[in-house]
């Protein structure tokens, strides 16, 4: 974290530049009784397959008396645990294998693929689905900009503009076949296997009535796009579509204690 005073006006908190990194290993474990019968002789004690998980971020917070701007960018692989990368985790690389069959890992979170390469029984490599994303948010103190009386009823207006996106690399998503489970635990070629990128944009107007109660109105636009242009596509309004979207209007009462 790098911290410095961007705006020296009284009451303005310091600006920050932040970077972070994470790295780990993921292991899918199969018990002996879960190994497909055709491969039991090659794996009499069960089987294991590992994959990498990593991610890094860069972000900033820039508060001033006129606005506050915050943003973040992240990139990594197997970001499902961080609710990123479109919630995909891994895929089985079955290229070059014949006689492929699958089995579910001991915790039910992964499907492991077995096959033959040059007549030798092997476990398919599990590779992480790579992804990236980020957001930017602009907060505007409307009451201050319009010189409202700090002690008056018009002192509590604030506006926010926001845009964020998250994506899984299309070339990795296209590798996900029925041998891999999707985020809801179903074979991925039956539900959402081609989900590639999502983004959201919203504008919010808030009015702080007092130290406890804040009223807010938000107008938002959500969009999800597929990783492929043809083939299996999800239904939107009853039609196979590469892109789905929805508009949402929300009114909220926020209580702060």
Image: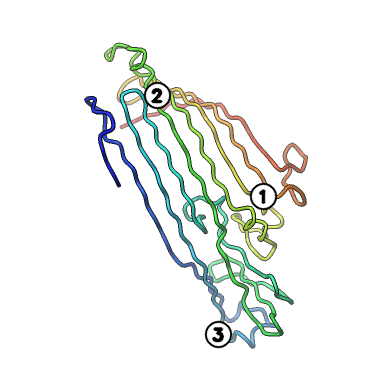
- Nearer the observer: mark 2 or 3; the answer is 2
- Dot label at residue 227: 1
Q: CA distance from mark 2 to mark 1?
A: 36 Å
The front one of 74 and 149 is 74
Quadrant, the C terminus: top left
Category of crowding for the residue at label 2, using alpha-carbon neighbours closer than 10 angstroms: few (below 14), some (14–19), many (at least 20): many
Front in this rendered view, residue 160 or 7: 7
Q: Residue at x 63, y 86 (%)?
A: 42
Element at label 3: loop
Which mark sits nearer the N-terminus, 2 or 3? 3
Secondary-structure class at tag 1: loop
**Left or right side of 37 for 88:** left
When asked about the image quadrant of residue 253, the answer is top left
Q: How many marks?
A: 3
Q: Which residue is mark 3?
A: 45
Question: Which mark lies nearer to you, 3 or 1?
Answer: 1
* Residue at the image point whose x is 26% and y is 38% from the top: 4
Pointer 2 residue: 140
């Amino acid at each position: 974290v790098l911290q410095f005073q961007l705006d020296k006006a009284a009451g303005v908190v310091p600006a920050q530049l932040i970077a972070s990194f994470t790295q780990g290993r993921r292991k899918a474990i199969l018990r002996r009784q879960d190994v497909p019968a055709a491969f039991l002789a090659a794996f009499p004690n069960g089987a294991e397959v590992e994959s990498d998980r990593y991610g890094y971020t860069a972000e900033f917070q820039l508060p001033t008396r006129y606005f506050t701007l915050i943003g973040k960018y992240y990139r990594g692989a197997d970001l499902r645990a961080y609710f990123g990368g479109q919630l995909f985790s891994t895929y089985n690389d079955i290229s070059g294998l014949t006689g492929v069959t699958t089995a579910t890992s001991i915790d039910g979170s992964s499907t492991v693929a077995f096959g033959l390469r040059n007549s030798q029984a092997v476990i398919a490599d599990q590779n992480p689905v790579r992804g990236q994303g980020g957001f930017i948010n602009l907060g505007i103190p409307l009451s201050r900009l319009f010189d409202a009386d700090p002690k008056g009823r018009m002192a509590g207006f604030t506006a926010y503009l926001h845009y964020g996106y998250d994506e899984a690399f299309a070339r990795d998503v296209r590798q996900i076949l029925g041998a891999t489970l999707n985020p809801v635990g179903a074979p991925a070629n039956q539900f959402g296997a081609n989900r590639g990128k999502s983004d959201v944009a919203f504008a919010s107007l808030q009015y702080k009535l007092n130290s406890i109660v804040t009223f807010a109105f938000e107008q938002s636009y959500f969009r999800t796009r597929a990783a492929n242009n043809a083939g299996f596509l999800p239904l939107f309004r009853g039609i196979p579509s590469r892109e789905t979207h929805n508009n949402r209007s929300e009114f909220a009462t926020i209580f702060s204690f």
